[in-house]
Amino acid sequence: MHTRPLRTDELDLFVGATPDHRREVEQYLENMFAAGSMRPEWCFVAEEEGEGPVGRVAFWTLPGMEEPFALVLLDVPWDTDYVSGGTRLLEDVLEKARALGAEEIEHVVDDPPMRPQFQHHPQKRVALLEGVGFAFRRETGRFEWRGGEPPAVPGRLSFRTLEEVGEDAFVEAMTEVSEGTLDREIRGERERLGAQRAAREFFEDARRVKHDPAWWRLAYAPNGELVGLVMPAEPPGFLTIFYIGVVPRMRGQGYVDDLLAAGTATLLEARRETGNEKPLLADTDVANGPMAAAFERAGWVRFAGRREYIVALTPDRGQPAAV
């Protein structure tokens, strides 16, 4: 079996791996290419001599990043010998990701399967991922705003934008908000890198996602104390609450509802002004029960679950190692 990147004129070969969903995959590729999150040469097929393609997968990244961040559109013959072929495919592309400078790669499995990845056979997918070194990181609930009356924004907080407070103050607020977080990814990065460095790296990653700096705001109580922050954004294909949080000393007073109401209103206004119909989607760690409850109070609907897996790519080894 041989794994190779596609030529620009071969995208139909890649799309054809899921013939029942050609249009959805084509549209996804078009949107991701335009956003800078994917490239034709980051789409790979596995081929058996005389048989044609027997598997596919692609790299995805945050706009503006040069190294891959995640694997998407993974498909192999799930009803036959998916283990040997899938293992070879993943080992090959993970080695390519390491050569491109990636230090780790993630992959998510949605339940139920949904566009554009249509991830049927979830148990087989997880077994394949774990077989090449991926480790489970966290599970999230996926929420969507499906219309109705938007939550009212209470008047007890005042807001200052990123432009008004400056980057350093905003990163410092992110450092405070992450203390005691129930989000396993953010907590893990804080433990690994230290609170301030983790906040700075999260901020730098977030700023790669399309947004208006006026959307990112710090919130203050009437006495001037920092309450928290909200960071709406527009990743390719949808609008989201990228990050939201309350500082430890202000928790338990319902301020997360105020922040979420403000963030939801910002996204709805942005959608109205542009006239697009992009969905409003957001994820929260299932371990973060209070945040999930806040989304539900605000009128967001949980529509799916997502399991995140990650593998570390060490520079001194040809094979990936699990974190």
Image (cartoon, rainbow, N blue to C red):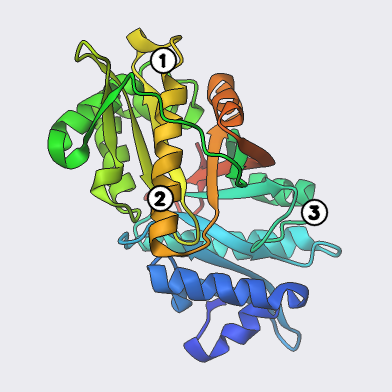
> What's the residue type where badge 3 is placed?
His
User: At which x and y percent is residue 210?
Assistant: 34, 56
Instruction: Mark 1 or mark 3: name the one nearer the start of the chain.
Output: 3
> What's the residue type where badge 2 is placed?
Glu
Instruction: Mark 3 or mark 2: name the one nearer the start of the chain.
Output: 3
Q: Residue at x 57, y 83 (%)?
A: 11
- Identify the disc placed on residue 180: 1
Q: As rendered, which of 257 and 272 lies closer to the eye?
A: 272
In space, the residues marked 1 and 3 are separated at their CA atoms by 36 Å
Q: Nearer the observer, disc 1 or disc 2? A: 2
Which residue is the site of mark 2? 269
Q: Residue at x 54, y 33 (%)?
A: 284
- Identify the disc placed on residue 121: 3
Q: In the image, is residue 151 above or below residue 311?
A: above
Kindly state the secondary structure of the residue where label 2 is placed.
Answer: helix
Can residue 166 be seen at all in this image of the molecule? no
User: At which x and y percent is residue 112?
Assistant: 75, 48
Total labels: the figure holds 3
Can residue 30 be seen at all in this image of the molecule? yes
Badge 1: residue crowd in 10 Å (few <14, some 14–19, many ≥20): few
Q: Nearer the observer, disc 1 or disc 3? A: 1
Left or right, 16 with respect to 71, comes to: right
Q: Residue at x 58, y 44 (%)?
A: 145
Left or right, 215 with respect to 4, comes to: left
> What's the residue type where badge 1 is placed?
Gly
Q: Nearer the observer, disc 3 or disc 2? A: 2
Badge 2: residue crowd in 10 Å (few <14, some 14–19, many ≥20): few
Q: In the image, is residue 36 above or below residue 260?
A: below
